[in-house]
Each structure stands twice: as structure tokens, then as C-alpha cells.
Amino acid sequence: MLGRIIQEQKNYYLVDILRSEPVRAVLKGVAKSKQKRIAVGDFVEVELFDGIADNAIIRDVCERKNYLLKPLIANIDNVFFVNCLIKPNLDLFYIDKFIFCAAIKEIPVTLVFNKTDILSESQLDELENFAQIYKKIGFDVLLTNINDKKSIEKIKNAAKEKVSVFAGQSGVGKSSIMQILFPDEYFAVQELSTNLLRGKNTTSHTSLLRLSNGGFIADTPGFSFFETPNIEPQFIASYFSDFVDILKKTPCKFSNCSHKNEPNCSIKSAVKENIIVESRYKNYVVLYDEISARVRKN
């Protein structure tokens, strides 16, 4: 029987097999010898037994479509990347670097801008302008606040029949959103630091929590960023979807164009014509220089 790991305990795993309650399973034989460590989210083949303490044995572990190491979780369908305009302040480089790293891992991202209830009208307009940048390049964008349950319901609908993960800086309200989605669970929420305007992470383990619509959301510790992948600088632009659209229509003069200093560059022209947003281009350049420096160092 096929199931999904939803939690790791000290000596066993909890496996969801579409029953009302998950089964407790231990790892045995071939599956144990060929797998370094099972991740929450892994699909496994289990054999069920009745009348014994551990009522299932994991016989095999299926191939993963993707995974993260910190926290260890596999087969992710979507990341809800939560940000705020203020408290903590919005960082567009942080967003662009995150969605770049997610693109390399082939993990879709839904951008969530939370705490809209603390914004003035002018700040809401400013946030909507930022949201439009990412809507235009194909990202799903949700504006939320925990005092508007309908806005949180949009997250639940977007998570339907998927395995989703929340990510973002501490203090953006991930735990508060989770508390609304799972009212029978407890998610500790701490106040923002007065120095850093960031909260402290309060989750110490990884598990999958089932939504009533068939989706799962991971309760993960300390997930604020992907590790920057090892990639050659010339391939960075291929993970900026708005750059790819331009290059398909109008390739640059040089096939190895870095889109920084070369003449007849389609990307730089698109920036001048406001087809590509300037902040996206500037963040691309910073990321290009960052990865190039690391490549030279290695």
C-alpha cells in the first residue's frame, strides 16, 4: 500500500494512507539499507499488520521529485513565501533570490504579502505595485491579514490537494496564519525583536498537517531560505522567467551575454523600455556578481 510520511518519530514514522488516522511504521530490510534518511513527504510502500505495536513496515521508498535538506522534506508542490511591506520591511532582493533558488529546484512559489491590516492607504497602493511586478511575470500573489479570515481562506484553497511549505523571514506571520488554518493545533507566536523587527522561530520539528480539502502543509522549523545552488553564472538568467520571455523573442548579440556590460543586450534594452522592472534587473546583477565571486573562489 502506498502512503506518505507525515512525521518522523524517534523509532518510527507516521504514514498517511488515506485512513482517518495515520499508521505507525518502522523501516526494515532493503528499504533501510538503501535509504540514508527518510524525509517527511516521502512516498513509501508499506505492509500493514494488525495486533502488533508497530502496525506497518516500510518496504520501499519511492523516488523523490524534489527535496530540501534544511528542513528535510520531500515532494513539495508549492511554497507559500510570506513577506510584509513593514514589520519586517519588504526586501525585493530577498524575494528575487528566493524565487530564483526555487526555480532551480523546480518548486513553484506563491507569494504571500501579509499584515495588510497595519498599512495605510498609500502603503497599500505601494504594496499593490510590488504585487503587480510578480503577477505580470506569472506568480500567484495573495494579500492577507489574520483579521480577514477570507484572505487566509485563499491560502487554503491554493493548497488544495498539494503538499505546501511556508517560508519567509521570522516575524512575517507564518505561525499566525498556520494557527488559523489549523485551529486545533498550537503554534507559538513571539513578538518582534525591538532591535531587528523580526520574530524568533518557535517550531522545532517537521511534520505534515492535513487540511480538510486534501492538502498538506508542513509545519517546519527555521525555513527562511533555500541554499544558493551551485550554478555557472551564465545560466542564472534562464531562471528569471521575465528574462527568458525576452530572450526567446530577441536573443542578445552574444550567446554568452552576461546582460551586464555587453552591447546589443536584449535584457538591458528591455529594462530601458520598462518591459523588465528595474529592481528585478538590479537584483539579477547582484546575484550574478555574488555567484560569480563564489565560482572564482572555488
Image (tube, grey):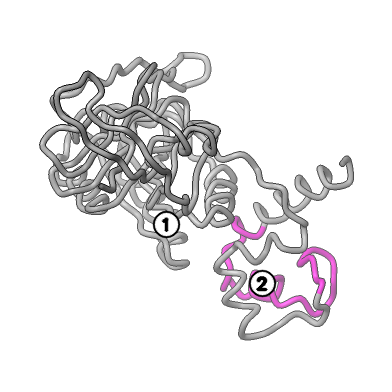
Residues at circles 1 and 2 in contact by the CB criterion of under 8 Å: no
Question: Can residue 96 be seen at all in this image of the molecule?
Answer: yes
274 within the magenta span: yes
Residue matched to label 1: 129
Q: Position of residue 38 (x, y in %)?
A: 45, 34
Q: Position of residue 14 (x, y in %)?
A: 28, 29
Task: Looking at the picture, tell me which residue is in the foreground, 297 or 283.
Answer: 297
Q: Left or right: where does residue 241 sit relative to residue 180?
A: right
Magenta highlight range: 256-281
The kind of secondary structure element at disc 1 is helix
Q: Position of residue 261 (x, y in %)?
A: 84, 66
Q: Position of residue 254 (x, y in %)?
A: 83, 78
Answer above or below: position of 179 versus 204. Answer: below
Q: Kindly identify the residue that appears in the image at 55 percent across and 53 percent down.
A: 105
Task: Looking at the picture, tell me which residue is in the foreground, 190 or 205.
Answer: 205
Residue matched to label 2: 272
Q: Left or right: where does residue 86 sit relative to residue 155?
A: right
Q: Kindly identify the residue that appears in the image at 24 percent across and 39 percent down.
A: 16
295 within the magenta span: no
Q: Left or right: where does residue 280 sit relative to residue 252?
A: left
Residue type, mark 1 in image:
Asn
